[in-house]
Structure formats: structure tokens, C-alpha cells
Amino acid sequence: MYIKQSELLMGTSMDFIKKFMDLSQMVSHVKGDVLFREKDPALYFYVLLNGRVKLGVGEGDQMVYDIKQNGEAFGWSSLIGRDRYSASAECIEATKLLKTDSQKLIKVLENDPANGIVFFKQLAATLGNRLLEIYKTISEQSE
């Protein structure tokens, strides 16, 4: 997957994508690796390149969302002023990610408001879709 194909970056300039990539590092993880735990300091933002990551909350990290689409973003707490992650993230198979220091990314977004607006609109759309999927899952479970 080319990162410019990620929905998160659709509509942003090639210059912005280059800056994003320059800030990011590609990391690989094996099944069972924990990227962060609920209430850990929110330091990084992630984009899935391939693999699967479980987002979980509460005791036992009950799964609330399965990140499996290439280009999906998570760890967004680090970009919206939250000091702590709102969920835990665990690799449920071998996984490749882009890991981005959120403070550095925020500075790029602040210095490029036009692309920053597009980026946050895409992030909001991603989160909205995720919320709808969670509603659907809850609805199916209660039937």
C-alpha cells in the first residue's frame, strides 16, 4: 500500500505527504506485541500498513474494534489533546505500521493549516465510520 492511497491523506498535498513520511518510521511487530495500553501516555499516532491490531478497553482489554484495513489510523488520542490513550492496542497477527511522533506531527499540521484541515476532516470521517461500525456490532449483539 502506498501511503498516499490512505484515506487519511486523501486530498492533502504531495509536500504534506512527504513531511508526514519523513516524520514516520516503519515498524514491524509480531502477534501479541502490545503497542500501548489504555491510559498510557499518548505519544504516537499509527497507520496500519498490513496486519491486524485489536483495540480493547477495560479489564482484559475487551475488543472494541479490529483494525484490519490497510491505511487505517489509530492512536488518535495523541492528536486531539488527550494525554492518555483511550484504549489498548495489541497486534493479533504480524503487523507493519507507520509510527509517528504526535508532537512533531501536530507542529506540521499547525504550520500547514490547509492540509491540516483536510487531514483532520479525514480523521473525523474515519472515526465516524468506526463509531457506526461499533453501533452496528452492539445492535447485532442485542438482537
Image (cartoon, rainbow, N blue to C red):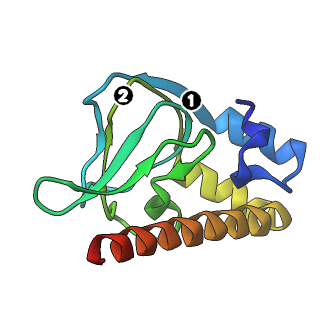
Q: Earlier in the sequence, mark 2 or mark 1?
A: 1
Q: Amino acid at mark 2?
A: Glu
In the rendered image, which quarter contains the N terminus? top right
In the rendered image, which quarter contains the C terminus? bottom left
Q: How many marks?
A: 2
Nearest the camera: 59 or 63?
A: 63
Residue neighbourhood size for the residue with mark 2, other residues' Cα within 10 Å, grouped as few (<14), some (14–19), many (≥20): some
Which residue shows up at 36% across the image and 28% down it?
Answer: 93
Residue 50, relative to residue 8: is it above or below? above
Residue 86's disc number = none
On the rendered structure, is 88 left or right of 132?
left
Nearest the camera: 37 or 125?
A: 125
On the rendered structure, is 86 left or right of 13?
left
Q: Amino acid at mark 1?
A: Gln
Instruction: Report x, y in % for residue 33.
Output: 28, 30
Q: Which residue is mark 1?
A: 25
Which residue shows up at 19% across the image and 54% down it?
Answer: 61
Instruction: Report x, y in % for residue 24.
Output: 60, 35
Q: Secondary structure at mark 2?
A: loop
Which residue shows up at 70% across the image and 42% down it?
Answer: 20
On the rendered structure, is 54 left or right of 25?
left
Q: Which residue is mark 2?
A: 93
Residue 79, relative to residue 102: is it above or below? below
Q: Secondary structure at mark 1?
A: strand
Instruction: Report x, y in % for residue 40.
Output: 26, 54
* C-alpha gap between disc 2 and disc 1: 19 Å
- Asked which quadrant contains residue 107, the reply is bottom right
Which residue shows up at 71% across the image and 45% down it?
Answer: 6
Residue farthest to the front, as pictured: 143
Residue 4, relative to residue 32: is it above or below? below
Instruction: Report x, y in % for residue 102.
Output: 52, 52
